[in-house]
Amino acid sequence: MIMNISIVTVENLKFYYIDNHYHKILEYFYYFFYIIKKFIKKERVMKTLFILLLFINILFSSDQIQPLTESWAPYQIENKNGLSGISIDLIKEIQKRLGNKKEIKLFPWKRAYNITLRKKGYALFLTSKSKEREKLFKWIGPIASIKVRFFKNASRKDLDIKTLEDAKKVDSIIVEGDTITFDTLKMLGFKNLDINTLANNRLNKLLENKTDLLPADEVTFIYNLKQKDLDKKILPVKMEAFFESKLYIAFNKDTSDDIIKDWKSAFEEIKADGTYDKILERY
């Protein structure tokens, strides 16, 4: 199992504690309770015990990871009923099995990335593991995969993009910064990148012919275009995907190895018992 249950017996009372990370704390708790029993009146023992249990509960809650993500259908979908999607359902199932009650928070990608990069106790999903990022985080996965290709306005008959060199010659390629797509294009030598944070702004610029190309994951972008009845106005170029990558959960690098082990074990159980396949079938 992912978590172990420890039992400490004090004066015929049994206290159950989950997760072997806290065995040392429980040992101290036992001896401390024994000491206060010797020096504190009986009627005050239970009050003191309650305070100690509250303190331990705080320790437990501080060990819970706060998951962050962005809106990115069909993996992360925001609607009137809350959050859903392939990776949302997966993370919720992992949380359920680990007893993690943190509510998944939705942020713009750059903000979620920076929070996870700088603050212990946070995890970001889904994200690619590039060479530049690999040492910045701790990783679990892969969870899914992407294929990134260029899209253009259907009215732009003049854009006949068959190779990367063709794409380098256009005036403007709009792309989100601090993403694996941006990093890949820079590594490939692209100088015509227009960085724009907001997904709607990028799409509108392409619709209004204020940019030439927009790189995006094939599955998610086409899904979104169909949802907005734009799949006839925005089309993929002739060139196939220029980048393929697997997607992971990234944890702040100071996250303890025990926590990473627990999350990894939960994910592997979900795949092994068929729950992961059932999640995929929903979408």
Image (spheres, rainbow, N blue to C red):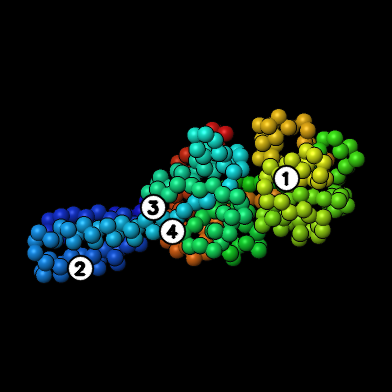
Instruction: Decide if residue 67 is on the left or right side of residue 71.
Output: left
Q: Quadrant of the C terminus?
A: top right
Gap in Å between the C-alphas at discs 1 and 4? Answer: 37 Å
Look at mark 4 in the image and give the residue it sits on.
Answer: 259
Gap in Å between the C-alphas at discs 3 and 1? Answer: 43 Å
Earlier sequence position, callout 1 versus callout 4 = 1
Q: Residue furthest right?
A: 158
Gap in Å between the C-alphas at discs 4 and 2? Answer: 27 Å
| CA neighbours of label 4 inside 10 A, class few (<14), some (14 to 19), many (20+) | some
Q: Which residue is drawn at the image coordinates 29% and 65% (left, top)?
A: 25
Earlier sequence position, callout 2 versus callout 1 = 2
Look at mark 1 in the image and give the residue it sits on.
Answer: 202
Earlier sequence position, callout 4 versus callout 2 = 2
Label 1: element kind: helix
Earlier sequence position, callout 2 versus callout 3 = 3
Q: Amino acid at mark 4?
A: Ile
